[in-house]
Image (cartoon, helix red, strand yellow):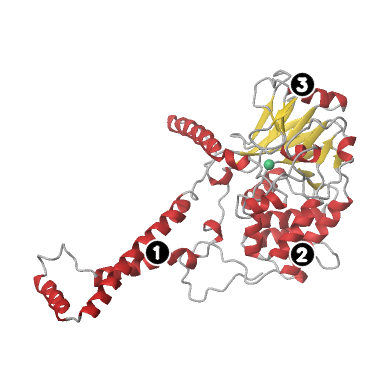
Amino acid sequence: MEPLKDPLNDRVVSQLPLPPQRSLPMDMLIKPFSNLPCWKFLKDHLSQEGKLSKSSVIFLISQARFLFETESNIIELFDPVVIVGDLHGQFYDLLKILEVGGNPENTKYIFLGDYVDRGHFSLEIILLLYAIKINFPHTFYLLRGNHETRQMTSHFNFRKEVVYKYDLETYEIIMESFDAMPLACVVNGKFFGVHGGISGQLGVLNDIKNINRFNEPPHDGLFCDLLWSDPVDSQVGDLSEKFVYNETRSCSCVYGLKAARSFLKNNALTSIIRAHEVQMDGYKMHMWDGVHKFPTVLTIFSAPNYCGTYKNKGAILRLEDSTIDIKQIDRSTEPFVLPHQLDVFTWSVPFIIEKTLSFLNTILLPNNENEDQLPEENELIENMFEEMHDHRKAVLVSKIRSASKMTKMVEEFKEKHLLTKHLRNNSEENTGPGEMTDEEEHEIERSLKIFYRRKAKDIVNEKRPQPK
Ligand SMILES: [Mn+2]
């Protein structure tokens, strides 16, 4: 599609590509003589910040939902396959993942959920992944994560994003598509893939097949645990009991070696591959059964520099002949977005008010500092006051008071919204690998510190919000 026209060539940042001129209509989205979306064209369109017509959006969502509905609760597949963890609205990193992982035309993919929330481009992720799913329904799979729910998307920012970009109806239709997503997968009959992990209520894989998944996930039980549970954070997977309550999440459980071992044994499986927790390197091998054995649990997290502040790598995992190959990804640059989807005019209003008020103050308030320099002016004002009627004098004084009150109010408003602070957080970028200098080593140490500090600060966001 033609880019927006710029006849005066007066853009402030001229090196940025111009976004497409119009929303993508259905007849441009669908390949001729088929009912399939042209996903490559869509990918380019979305990466240039293009929009879609609402009918195109509804088409993609309903087609994908229809495909999810035909799938079983557990997807069974064979390697080679690329496994992808949390993406959290980082669309420009998804583009990199598809580049590094391989063309979906001839590469099998399975995504472990958490496509949305936190980042600014969750809707773009959903639309592109759905378009690819529609083209390759039997080699491209999407599992449900704990964020693919009404509760989480309302608590975080995906609902706001969809309402801002489209409307509430579109949001509702997306939620219905989330309800239809499958819950788990088994690769080669050996590797169990899921977003969170196992459960005290999971004996055999058939227990998962018996779940009625077409719902908002409940607050406890097997369905909840598959999306929410975590492995214990320990070198050897020791835990007082098989499963303990998950304090960090305010729901579900933590599992250790005992629980994982008996689940794997009962189902003749080798390993649990899951996502759900940010990792400094983008992945973590939980070697509970010893360093020479296959990891009991493997965490894969694919959103690099998570939330723009964690400084972590993203990673994807390739399973081939039952061996693991991990590829790491650095953060890609993405278009700048103001906090809370503010447009630039709304964002700048407080600054304009502030400036206007400071002019007003300068005009209205007698300035003490300038008293010596401009005696004739002050004298003039004093004379004016004297000459004024009492009533008019009172009016002027009250105007001066209101102006200074408003100045104070605007200052408080700005403090409260911390708009400038938010902006500073958005400009972090990772650099590529190379030879390590002392400086770089210090940088890594610093990054690690930042990662753990950031993780500790963000821990409240890992909790499940309590039902109202
Ligand atoms: Mn998660």
Ligand 1 appears in which quadrant?
A: top right
Instruction: Name the kind of residue labelled 2 in the image.
Output: Ile
Label total for image: 3
Residue at (49, 32) in percent of width and height = 449
Provide residue 253's location: percent of width, then percent of height.
72, 32
Q: Residues within 10 Å of mark 3 (few under 14, many from 20)?
A: some
Against 408, is 248 above or below? above
| Ligand 1 contact, mark 1 (Cβ < 8 Å) | no
User: Which disc number belongs to residue 258?
Assistant: 3
Quadrant (top left, top right, bottom left, bottom right) of the N terminus: bottom right
Against 424, is 254 above or below? above
Instruction: Indicate which disc, 1 or 3, sits on the residue closer to the N terminus.
Output: 3
Residue at (56, 63) in percent of width and height = 17
Q: Is residue 466 visible?
A: yes
Label 3, secondary structure: give it.
helix
Q: Is residue 334 left or right of residue 321?
A: left
Marks 1,3: beta carbons within 8 A: no
Instruction: Indicate which disc, 3 or 2, sits on the residue closer to the N terminus.
Output: 2
Against 159, is 251 above or below? above
User: Which disc number belongs to residue 351?
Assistant: 1
Q: Residues within 10 Å of mark 2 (few under 14, many from 20)?
A: some
Provide residue 424's location: percent of width, then percent of height.
45, 50
Instruction: Name the kind of residue labelled 3 in the image.
Output: Lys
User: Which disc number belongs to residue 58?
Assistant: 2
Provide residue 242's location: percent of width, then percent of height.
76, 23
Instruction: Name the kind of residue labelled 1 in the image.
Output: Phe
